[in-house]
Amino acid sequence: MRRQHVDICDVSRTGCRVENSQRLAVGTIVMLTVDIDGRRLVELFRVSRSGGLPGADQPHETGLEFLPMPADMVSLHDIVAQLDQSDAT
């Protein structure tokens, strides 16, 4: 297990795109920890794509796909779904 800081660039109902310092292999399962409004959320993702970003602050771009989480845990996926619903109204 290794830790690295990532910049979350885009989030959707199915996953997110991050910029990071080290390349992650496609298929790798990763744990992402995010602090939102004082709540720490832990999310499991699968790397769906990975590529270079020449000239960027973080040299790699990684596409992450949400993996199922236990129903009793609040997840980043749940928050994105709530935001999508509030934008629709």
Image: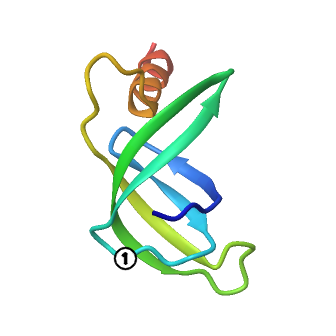
**What amino acid type should be assigned to the residue bearing mark 1?**
Ala
Q: Position of residue 84 (x, y in %)?
A: 44, 26
Query: Camera-side residue: 84 or 59?
Result: 59
23 versus 88 height, above or below: below
Q: Quadrant of the N terminus?
A: bottom left
- Is 74 on the left-hand or right-hand side of 36? left
Quadrant in the picture for residue 82: top left
Q: Position of residue 72 (x, y in %)?
A: 31, 16
Color scheme of the displayed model: rainbow
70 versus 10 height, above or below: above
47 versus 26 height, above or below: above
Q: Please tell me whether mark 1 sits on a helix, a strand or a loop.
A: loop
Q: Which residue is mark 1?
A: 25
Q: Position of residue 17 (x, y in %)?
A: 49, 57
Q: Tell me what residue is drawn at x 37 percent, y 76 percent.
A: 25
Query: Camera-side residue: 41 or 50?
Result: 41
